[in-house]
Amino acid sequence: MTPAPDIRADQTRKIQSLVEALLASNRFYAAKLRAAGVDRVPGDLRAFCARVPFTCKTELIDDQSKHPPFGSNLTYPVEDYSRFHQTSGTSGQPMRWLDTPESWSWVVECWTRIYRSAGVGRQDRVFFPFSFGPFLGFWGGFDAAAHLGCLAIPGGGMRSTARLRTLLDNEVTVLCTTPTYAIHLAGVAAEEKVDLSAGKVRASVVAGEPGGSIPATRSHIEQLWCGARVVDHHGMTEIGPVSYACPLRRSVLHVMEAAHFPEVIDPDTLAAVGPGGTGELVLTNLGRIGSPILRYRTGDTVTLAPEPRCECGSLEMALEGGILGRRDDMVVVRGVNMYPSAVEQVLRSSGGVAEYRVDVYSEKSLAEMSIQIEPSAGEDPAALSHRIAAALQYAFGLRIAVSSVPAGALPRFEAKSKRWFYR
């Protein structure tokens, strides 16, 4: 997908300034670039892609191990940095990440665009129902809400019942959370007989999982929250906020190309993927000079829109279905590629599932899968298991073992969920 000429020119200028700064004072990238034969600023984006090597997460983790505690991917002295964050560690060893005031302003501005695309403004009261750990997204979203002039309400250190009371008492209009916790919080409201329709929540801005771009999960959350619109986006601690929800096509995420230079590659051949193709998202952040990333292999699987111009009028890269999943999470079961987002779409669209767990295991050297489901109140467990198994067979052409477990048997999650287990 080719961005508009003015977007491409802006990206080129920013990449040239970024590479110049890194060659001058960033030990990690200066060494990496010169080892690849890059000792001067690339002339255009094509030269950048041809000459600058990819960055992988393992390199960054290894660098922090060799140069503790923060690694050598710092463009300025440590004394110039004022923000500390850390990756969630859901896919490996956590990484520490620092930001200068200037880089943090870039993060906040990206988050501000996410809010504006969701129609959030200074009239809103935005609630953050999670404990504020070192994960970047919590803090970026909070600071950006305050920057917009919203009333930003923290919900750390509270049980779910107290968060619900805070939400209602303070007439919260926007909820920022993971899709999983939005579902869980609504479930607690039902158990405690808290009437969510008495509240004023009109939108849920979600991230951390693919759920917000999965139609069935999005619809499920909106039903639980009395029609409050679900708005998806995504980002990473080490790369920053990346995308915002298309205002017209609800399962599409647009990459903020003023803030990032995106590529989509075939993960095996490393060749660029064309419009309509599926591959791995690669990102270069353009405004976080103090803690930069060049051509970062995110591991996220995405599908490019077939047309360069979206129905909403945007020429920024459009990702059909949002983040489909991580490449590491895709499982081949009897010759069928199974992505977590596709499985969740089937489970949520079938209805009656309060929570679920997927077990992937090896049988006769082949991957197999089984699913445990926790029925919603009033659902017949046997009938639900049969219905889910039939829906999975229709969707994937596979017989997958489905069993039910008692209410409350499966864990609930405040931040990112862990529903897939490999053994």
Image (cartoon, rainbow, N blue to C red):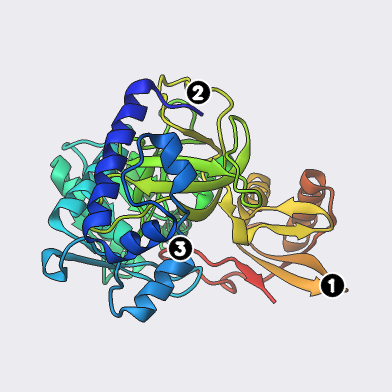
Q: Label 3 belongs to which residue?
A: 416
Q: Position of residue 9 (x, y in %)?
A: 32, 28
Along the line of sight, which residue is nearer the eye, 181 or 248?
248
- Label whose residue precedes the other's in the sequence (1 or 2): 2
Point 32% across, 57% down: residue: 137
Callout 1 touching callout 2 (CB < 8 Å): no
| Residue 168 in sight in this render | no
- Mark 2 sits on what residue? 308
In the image: residue 387, left or right of residue 92:
right
User: Mark 1 highlights which residue?
Assistant: 365
The crowd level at tag 2 (other Cα within 10 Å; few <14, some 14-19, many 20+) is some
Q: Secondary structure at mark 2?
A: loop
| Secondary element at image label 1 | loop
Q: Amino acid at mark 3?
A: Lys
Vertical side of 74 occupied by 283: above or below = above
Of circles 1 and 3, the one toward us is: 1
Residue type marked 1: Ser
Disc number for residue 27:
none
Q: Name the residue type under label 2.
A: Pro
